[in-house]
Image (cartoon, rainbow, N blue to C red):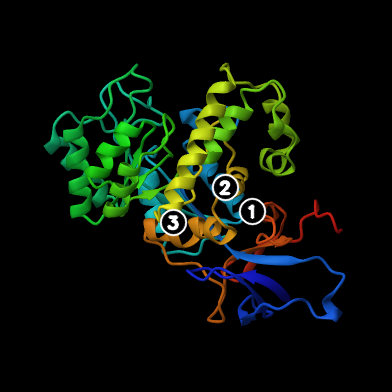
Amino acid sequence: MHHHAGLGGGDLGPAHITIGPDGSVDSVRPWAPPVPAEAGGPELTAIPLLADSHLHLGISDGVHDDPDFHTIDHIDGQLEQLARFGIGLAHSLGTDQPWLTETLVERRAADPLGRAVGHSAGVGFGAVDGWPPELTRPRLRYRPTEPEQARGYVRDLAAQGCTTVKIWTDSFGGTVPKTLTAIARAIIAEAHDHGITTFAHVKDHADAESLVELEVDVLAHSIRDRPISDRLLDSMAVHGTTLVPTLSREEAEFAFSTLHNPYLEDDSFRRAAGPRGVERLRHERLSVDPAHPARSLEIALENVRRTHTHGIDVGLGTDSGFRFKLLGFAQHRELELLTRAGLSTSAALGAGLAVNRRLLGAEQTGIDSTGPASFFIVEGDPWKDIRATQSIEEVWISGRRIVAHSPESSHR
């Protein structure tokens, strides 16, 4: 079986692969145009399974959010759905209960069984009476009032096996308290003492400036209140900060604020939602002026463009797993939006491969001739049009095909 493949790692580009009968990759050779005998068939591309460094497991069914969704059965269904869309690594960011954190740590040493591999940042940090509200139970979000208390909570997360932590820093338009600088400093310092990567939810430029100076590792959203300054870009470069912009989050907020939601006619969205989900979502609308999320998306896109051109790493994250933000659909939409922001196909795919796997301390996925591989095959060439990643033909995990040829494929 021959496929035109995208290789993981720093040199992401097309190649030919040959898959043996046991699912192992027999050979990899430089890509060349199809020979005449191969002409007339569909153009297929294989891509290593992607990683999403910012999503949320077990809080939603895509239409409604509810703590009752925080069960292993529901979460396993979400990890299976992500795998069907070519997502091999899912990082749940700060909304989990300790039992899920511990379960995912134990599972990472086992066979993924056709599911995405889950990582968890455990219980996240917020301010007292601050954003966001509680999303799972019974363990409430950490809301420390003293630096030493914050450090103790980080030690608890380290003991549970967390390699990442999440801080929310957002006054939600001045309506709620936000995490104090002294508390954020203590969290970040203690996390770094334990080799833990720190993610921070931000919206406003001023908060991002403060967190970067405190040496936070990742800004978990693009700045959305104003254009990013040269000073902040320079500071991010000096401190090695990574941006995970979640552009698909902003676009979803816009789509569901419009009278005629374009997502409902999108084939990839409809596949992720399923017929029943599409029908339920047809009647849902955010009660906001579409101009507000449209402006947030416009600012976010420009700030990603400037961040990328400044040489700062950009990772793939979606904030999906909430209502309206569908797992599977959002990750491929994020790729499309990253290219709209000026990233090349290789850089956009690299955001979901090398960058995210560095952030999560996970093994780099590649396609090479050393053994069973994990990848997905799409119809078309993403180097010509990134939307080709949405036309999924097959998904392979550890040398086993878990998704066969798609019935929606246009050439069948």
Q: Name the residue that disc number 3 marks.
A: 356
Q: What quarter of the picture does the C terminus occupy?
A: bottom right
Q: Name the residue that disc number 2 marks.
A: 331
Give the amino acid type for the residue marked by disc 1 in the picture: Arg
Quick check: 354 above or below 167? below
Quick check: 294 above or below 389? above
- Relative to 277, 200 lies left or right: left
Q: Residues within 10 Å of mark 1 (few under 14, many from 20)?
A: many
Residue 375 location, x and y as percent? 60, 65
Residue 203 location, x and y as percent? 39, 32
Q: Is mark 3 on a helix, strand or loop?
A: helix
Residue 24 location, x and y as percent? 61, 78
- Please report the residue visible at 14 percent of the width from the left and 36 percent of the height from the top: 147
Residue 211 location, x and y as percent? 27, 40
Q: Give the quarter of the image for residue 92.
A: top left
Quick check: 208 above or below 257? below
Which dot, 1 or 3, sits closer to the camera? 3
- Please report the residue visible at 48 percent of the width from the left and 37 percent of the height from the top: 300
Is residue 96 visible in the rendered image? The answer is yes
Is residue 61 visible in the rendered image? The answer is no
